[in-house]
Image: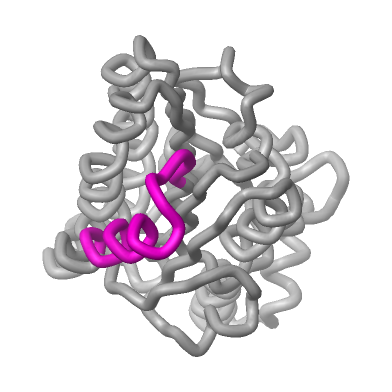
Amino acid sequence: MKGRVALVTGGGRGIGRETALLLAAAGARVMIVARSAGELADVGPDYVAADLGTAEGCALAVAETERRLGPIDALVVNHGIGSAHERLVWEQDPAVWRDTMRINLDGPFELARLTVGGMCRRGYGRVVFTSSTAGEKAERSGSAYSASKHGLIGLARALAQDAGPFNVTSNAVLPGWVRTAMAERSAAMNAQQRGISVEQVWRERAAIYPQNRVLEPVEVARVIAFLCSEAAGGVNGEAITVALGGMW
């Protein structure tokens, strides 16, 4: 990755933060993006605050990266909104559906649209989308989240076909439960609904996996960093589950 330029969204915390640090340690010039500048400033790499649920925010993130660091070689699309606020599909607020698609699917499309063409012209590129195990197995009361994460896998595979002839790869990573801020919000909501403790929710989540624990963000980040590397040139159009051997 030495000298490569990487744009990492959702880079202020969790998986995105760990990915940005790993890429920087491998020699990449990294730009991290999130909505809040406050959570970006302490990470280390260059950063820009932008709303990636809008076309304008995506354009700003790409333009600032290219202006400061140069043409983008690796795009890690890691930002997203969770499902803690969702309901059964017949009770779902259509605004929740629209917001989830805007952030989880429209933004990734815009970022890919703005960057992959340049990668193809230069003859090199890596694109990685953070989907979820919910991208293959839908969750209850999560129609918008599940649909958006399924869509990310489709987008990754479509890009793999479009850009593959130009030495540009596109893959999706599907984490299981990771103790991130977004997952903490869903745990708190689940605990409140059921009248149990947040720690009990996390114990139940850990029990899903053979190791009886949930993932650390860096464990997912290592897979993303590999897919961004030149060593991963033979991996294209894949949905790679990182879930400790769990069945969901």
Describe the colour scheme in one phrase: one colour
Q: Between residues 120 and 194, which one lies in front from this camera angle?
A: 120
Residue drawn at (46%, 39%) of the image? 73
Residue drawn at (55%, 43%) of the image? 4
Question: Seen in the image, is 219 located left or right of residue 188?
Answer: right
Q: Quadrant of the C terminus?
A: top right
**What percent of the width, then of the height, locates residue 159?**
31, 26
Residue drawn at (21%, 60%) of the image? 59
Question: Seen in the image, is 214 located left or right of residue 15?
Answer: right
**Does 124 appear above or below 207?**
above
**Farthest left residue in view:** 94
**Does 57 appear above or below 149?**
below
Image quadrant of residue 2? top right
Residue 156, magenta (yes or no) = no
**What percent of the width, then of the height, locates residue 233?**
57, 18
**What percent of the width, then of the height, locates residue 167?**
44, 17
Principal secondary structure, stretch drawn in magenta: helix
**Farthest right residue in view:** 211
Q: Is residue 232 visible?
A: yes
* Magenta span: 58-75
Tally of numbered discs? 0
Q: Quadrant of the N terminus?
A: top right
Residue drawn at (44%, 85%) of the image? 37
Question: Seen in the image, is 135 located left or right of residue 209?
Answer: left
